[in-house]
Image (cartoon, rainbow, N blue to C red):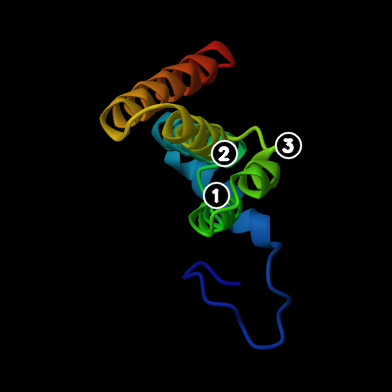
């Protein structure tokens, strides 16, 4: 490679990280700070995605199956579908099924709303306490 940055034919390309290292070295402290903050931001994003996955943010299948079974008139089987699941969505569906079975519809709706708010508060607190 010559001073213009063009690789001559037949010349071996530089190591892939050599160009990045040269860029950081020439950029000085500002580039180092930007690079460090970029790595930190990526770590926070990955941590949040991991937390959402643990909370069950994308696990809809079992909840849908349980609700379909419940709509078919088999509440015991619907509870069994969610019995061993401990994600937020499954806990909320279980509490909704219990409220629907024990209370009239207006009170059941209020109970489910209360349970959802409590679940959000617990999830938010657990995310803060594990930081």
Q: Alpha-carbon distance for marks 1 and 2?
A: 6 Å
Q: Alpha-carbon distance for marks 3 and 2?
A: 9 Å
Mark yes or no: residue 47 visible. no
Mark yes or no: residue 45 visible. yes
The answer to which of 91 and 15 lies nearer the viewer is 91
Q: Secondary structure at mark 3?
A: loop
Q: Is residue 131 left or right of residue 28?
A: right
Q: Which residue is at 59% across, 45% downward?
A: 75
Q: Is residue 84 left or right of residue 20?
A: right
Are the residues at dot 1 and dot 2 in contact (C-beta closer than 8 Å)?
yes
The answer to which of 9 and 80 lies nearer the viewer is 80
User: Which residue is label 3 attached to?
Assistant: 84
Quadrant of the snapshot with the C terminus: top right
Residue 29 occupies which quadrant of the picture? top left
Q: Which mark is residue 72?
A: none
Are the residues at dot 1 and dot 3 in contact (C-beta closer than 8 Å)?
no
User: Which residue is label 2 attached to?
Assistant: 90
x, y percent for residue 42 = 51, 40
Residue at the left extreme of this rendering: 106
Residue at the bottom extreme of this rendering: 9
User: Which residue is label 1 attached to?
Assistant: 63
Q: Alpha-carbon distance for marks 1 and 3?
A: 12 Å
Q: Which residue is at 46% across, 27% downward?
A: 102
């Amino acid at each position: 490679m010559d001073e213009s940055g063009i690789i001559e034919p037949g010349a071996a390309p530089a190591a892939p990280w050599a160009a990045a290292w040269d860029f950081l070295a020439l950029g000085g402290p500002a580039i180092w700070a930007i690079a460090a903050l970029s790595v930190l931001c990526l770590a926070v994003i990955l941590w949040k995605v991991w937390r959402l996955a643990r909370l069950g943010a994308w696990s809809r299948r079992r909840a849908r199956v349980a609700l379909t079974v419940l709509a078919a008139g088999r509440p015991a089987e619907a509870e069994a579908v969610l019995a061993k699941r401990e994600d937020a969505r499954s806990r909320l569906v279980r509490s909704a099924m219990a409220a629907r079975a024990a209370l009239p519809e207006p009170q059941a709706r209020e109970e489910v709303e209360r349970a959802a708010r409590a679940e959000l508060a617990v999830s938010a607190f657990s995310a803060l306490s594990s930081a």
